[in-house]
Image (tube, grey):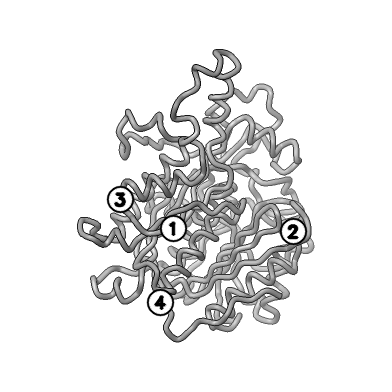
Amino acid sequence: MYEFVRKRPDQRKVVVTGLSIISPIGNDLKTAWDNAVNGKPGVGTISSFDISNTAVKIAGEVKGFDPLQFIEKKELKKMDRFVQMSIACSDMAIKDSGLDLSGDLGNEIGAYIGVGIGGLPYIEAQHKTFLEKGPRRLSPFFIPSVITNMASGLVSIRHGLKGPNFSITSACASGSHSIGEAAELIRRGQAKAMIAGGAESCVCPMAINGFAAMKALSTNNDNPEQASRPWDDDRDGFVLAEGAALLVLEDYEHAAQRGAKIYGEVKGYGASSDAYHITTPSPAGAASAINAAIKDAEINVEDIEYVNAHGTSTPAGDPNESMVLEDVFGASAKNLWVSSTKSMTGHGLGAAGAMESVFSLMALNTGVVPPTINLDKPSENCILDYVPKVAREKNLTHVLNNSFGFGGTNSCLIFGKV
């Protein structure tokens, strides 16, 4: 089993001082969290393109996001929607953190923003232009609008962040990998703070029909709000969603010195590969990442009270994750609370791990665990406590966030109280 080297005595403590989110259940932290706690579904019938010829007609679309609140109109044509949401989240996260970037602090701050696919809607539009009007009509902004690293690149340019900036692409684990790797950079003393998270906006014909061709998506078109149903016996696939979420990670000493509010500490980070199959998960790979995160956090399994699960609502993935948690947590699994906020948001691909890190940290702070909605009849092989339908209260000290992606890539984060 792959394991990280244990922390060195000189490693820095990494804390979270800023949060932001744009999601199908809200475009700011307060709204999204209130809706998550109250079990409000964000999945609906697709409104952004013609769905008359598509087998899957539902998605978790972000509603009411106005990029003009953050970006000048003339700049919008230079960036795909996932970049626009990244910039908006960076503004909100930095404001929430209280960081003052007017001096030289930006020299010691970087940005890691994970993106799974990138600007697919813009590629679709430009391809149509190419076919109908010829190559001379392609936008000069086409390439820089769609490549994944433009999320972190333009965030860095906007805020004068001169530390490392790049995009981690690891499918559905992109956002959580970015948070984990950004935390490692601060631990090593190579950055004072990092903007980290994920973004994705691929609710478009190519993505919907591509995932549908794999038989990966739910086809519960008549009941979209009930289509994402992790661990339920009637689940039939995940619901594609869009969104973005960014965290401000900071060296604890720097945060404490400036009197920053602290949401929690990045206690543990584990990453692994199944080395098994493109889309079928392996229990051993997921278990390896969870165990690595627990070892990195230097805690015991029973110290973790809540898991924000990957929980995608797929026939194979849900029982696999449930079985892994039973195995890793052993006797303490009976006391574990597990929920999937994807039951409300749908699956945000590269943004999912970051959005769920925000929900994990809010649960840690408020003592409220968001529910798994649409869980009417758990599958026979899914036997844990999935916090069905209604939120619960508990004084949490450690929470685990799981993210697993196509290609057998796994990333797990443990957040704890300082």
Quadrant in the picture for the C terminus? bottom left
- Establish if 233 lies above or below 79: below
| Mark closest to the chain's N terminus, 2 or 4 | 4
Q: Quadrant of residue 110?
A: bottom left
Residue type at numbered disc 3: His
Residue type at numbered disc 1: Ala
| Mark closest to the chain's N terminus, 2 or 3 | 3
Residue 280 spot, x, y in % from top left: 77, 55
Residue at mark 4? 13
Residue at mark 1? 196
Residue at mark 3? 159
Secondary structure at badge 1 equals: strand
Q: CA distance from mark 2 to mark 4?
A: 33 Å
Residue at mark 2? 281
| Mark closest to the chain's N terminus, 3 or 1 | 3
Q: Nearer the viewer, mark 1 or mark 2?
A: 1
- Establish if 220 lies above or below 103: above
Within 10 Å of the Cα at label 3, are there few (<14), some (14-19), or many (20+) other Cα atoms? Answer: some
